[in-house]
Amino acid sequence: MDFMDLFIKKRIRAVQKGDQNAYADLVDLYKDKIYRLCYRMLGNQHEAEDAAQEAFIRAYVHINTYNPDMKFSTWLYRIATNLTIDRLRKRKPDVYLDEEVNGTDGLTMQAQLPSREASPEEAVESLELQETVQRAIERLPEKYRSVIVLKYIEDLSLQEISDILGLPVGTVKTRLHRGREALRKQLGHL
Amino acid sequence: MKCPNEMISLMHHYLDGDLRPEEEQRLKEHLRSCAACAAHFHELKKTVAFLQYAAHLTAPPAFTTKVMKMMPKEKKSARLRRWMHGHPLLTAASLFVLLTVGSFASSWGENGAFSVSADEHVIIRDHTVIVPKGETVKGDIVVRNGSIRIEGTVDGNVTVIHGKKYMASAGQVTGEIEEINQVFEWIWYNIKEKVNHALQSLE
Ligand SMILES: [Zn+2]
């Protein structure tokens, strides 16, 4: 077990004993991963932040049901994935319409992209590409979307994805293949 | 020429990193001779690159602070334990004062008599206070050196000092439930009581 795993285990134990401050370290550690997952699943900054916060609160409230045989990140991903899928299912059709019309959400996202030296044209291009990729992901049916996001946005192994979604690895692969094909039709010609 | 679907399947297995060497060889040979499949493969790899590019995104500012503000209230004893941990000198000093004043520590240490503060709706049997089924106690209950069994309802806080609480089910107590079995919890309880008294006398 490496140092990081040990640190995480210790923080979890402290939280389980009732030390709320220890939880801040865990939130800090996983906030980018969980937020990213929520953003790519929901495609809306405000809703993503709300969902990511809810995921962390849910994990805290149920911390005593966490089984240490499982990686903590796997458990967190499972909570966040289920939560975003729930939200997608509960969405009313007019919400989709709204987003389609507004479409400005991605603009404010620029501030959160990692800063690196880039010309203004490059910045606009990269932003447009991010937008295009996001819209393509959003057009995927939810069962392909979750697999694609966990694989390529979160960079997880097929085994981890299978653990998170509670699906056999074979099913994960099939969904990944179909998801990639669907995305290829939208992004492959760019 | 229509290519076998098998080639597309091989491409995906390649992307998942589970292609056997001989399969990889077969795919490569086909791609060299088939422009359509080569284009398909190129598009798939480009799609993957775009997705990986989209992975760069971080949580909004002050995310952790916001989550911590939304957290449900933690147990008081955990908060006090942490405070004592972070302020060892102050803890020692306050303990010294408390011990000198003497009332808290000695009242904790002595084999205090069983006592209960509650109204007439309770039954007392062998140092155990029973809130019978169907009864509702209005107001707080404090049990010292004894236990409480709650079968009915308590409309207020329940505090058990040097004892245990037993409940038929959750949600029968409208206020807070506290069990005090350790010195620091006792001190905390006393400080809180003193502060409450002080506040009430100010009002
Ligand atoms: Zn071919």
Image: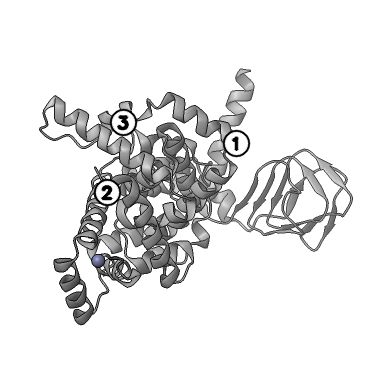
Q: Which amino acid does label 2 sit on?
A: Gly
Q: Where is residue A11 in the image (x, y as percent from the top left)?
A: 36, 56
Quadrant for the N terminus of chain A, please. Answer: bottom left
Q: In which quarter of the image is residue A162?
A: bottom left
Q: Where is residue A185 in the image (x, y as percent from the top left)?
A: 34, 49
Q: Badge 2 is on which residue?
A: A188
Q: Badge 1 is on which residue?
A: B193
Q: Which amino acid does label 3 sit on?
A: Met
Q: Residue A109 carries which label?
A: 3
At a point 47% along the width and 62% down the height, the residue shown is: A165
Whether residues under marks 3 and 1 lie with C-beta atoms below 8 angstroms apart, the answer is: no
Q: Which amino acid does label 1 sit on?
A: Glu
At a point 32% along the width and 71% down the height, the residue shown is: B4
Which is nearer the N-term, disc 2 or disc 3?
3
Q: Is mark 2 within 8 Å of ligand 1?
A: no
- Distance from label 2 to label 3 (Cα)? 24 Å
Q: Residue furthest bottom?
A: B22
Q: Which residue lies furthest to the front in this view?
A: B1
Q: Disc 1 sits on a residue from what chain?
A: B
At a point 71% along the width and 50% down the height, the residue shown is: B143
Q: Can residue B184 be seen in this view?
A: no
Quadrant for the C terminus of chain A, please. Answer: top left
Q: What element carries label 1?
A: helix
Q: In which quarter of the image is residue B110?
A: bottom right
Scheme of image coloration: one colour
Q: Is residue B187 left or right of residue B89?
A: right
Please tell me in which quarter of the rendered image ligand 1 is found: bottom left
Q: Disc 3 sits on a residue from what chain?
A: A
Q: Is residue B67 left or right of residue B165?
A: left
